[in-house]
Amino acid sequence: MTTIALTQHRISAQQPRVRTRLTRRGRVVLAVLLVLPLMIGGAMFAANSAAIAGVDGTSSVTFRHVTVQSGDSLWSIAERVAPGSDPRDVVSAIVDLNGLSSSMVQAGEQLAIPHQYDGAGH
């Protein structure tokens, strides 16, 4: 009979550590990928803050107000406050400025007149 000798060898399961090296170009790309979302987020925050500042009434612009008289319409008011302008443009500006949902106005209602048409009439 023959005897076979068995020898045990230990094999390490750990892989040798390979350090990842980035080239200069790789570092630039990585930096851009990290900084770009921060810049976009900052720009969005600034734009949102500017929009909120415009909405919350912090504007320093003043407007002349007219009181709607009995029988007045937006058209007649537009012709009265801006006789040299196209009434369609004036009506549109009054509707936008006052946040009106329709062109119907009630006697006694106060309407702000856009500054570009202010001073033409009462």
Image (tube, rainbow, N blue to C red):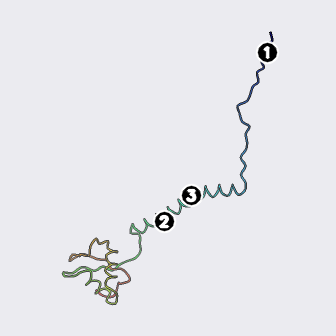
Q: Residues within 10 Å of mark 3 (few under 14, many from 20)?
A: few
Please state the horizontal and vertical placement of residue 1, each as a whole percent of the image.
Answer: 80, 9
> Please, what is the three-letter code of the amino acid marked with disc 3?
Leu
Picture disc at residue 47: 2
Question: What is the quadrant of residue 26 in the picture?
Answer: bottom right
Picture disc at residue 4: 1
Give the number of the mark in front: 1 or 2: 1
**Residue found at the very far front of the displayed protein:** 1
Q: How many marks on residues? A: 3
Question: What is the quadrant of residue 28 in the picture?
Answer: bottom right
Please state the horizontal and vertical placement of residue 7, each as a whole percent of the image.
Answer: 78, 20
Q: Residue at x 37, y 77 (%)?
A: 62
First along the sequence among labels 1 and 2: 1
Q: Is residue 14 above or below residue 6?
A: below
Q: Is residue 103 above or below residue 32?
A: below
Residue bearing the label numbered 3: 38
Tell which of 32 and 51 is nearer to you: 32
Q: Is residue 56 above or below residue 111?
A: above
Q: CA distance from mark 3 to mark 2?
A: 14 Å
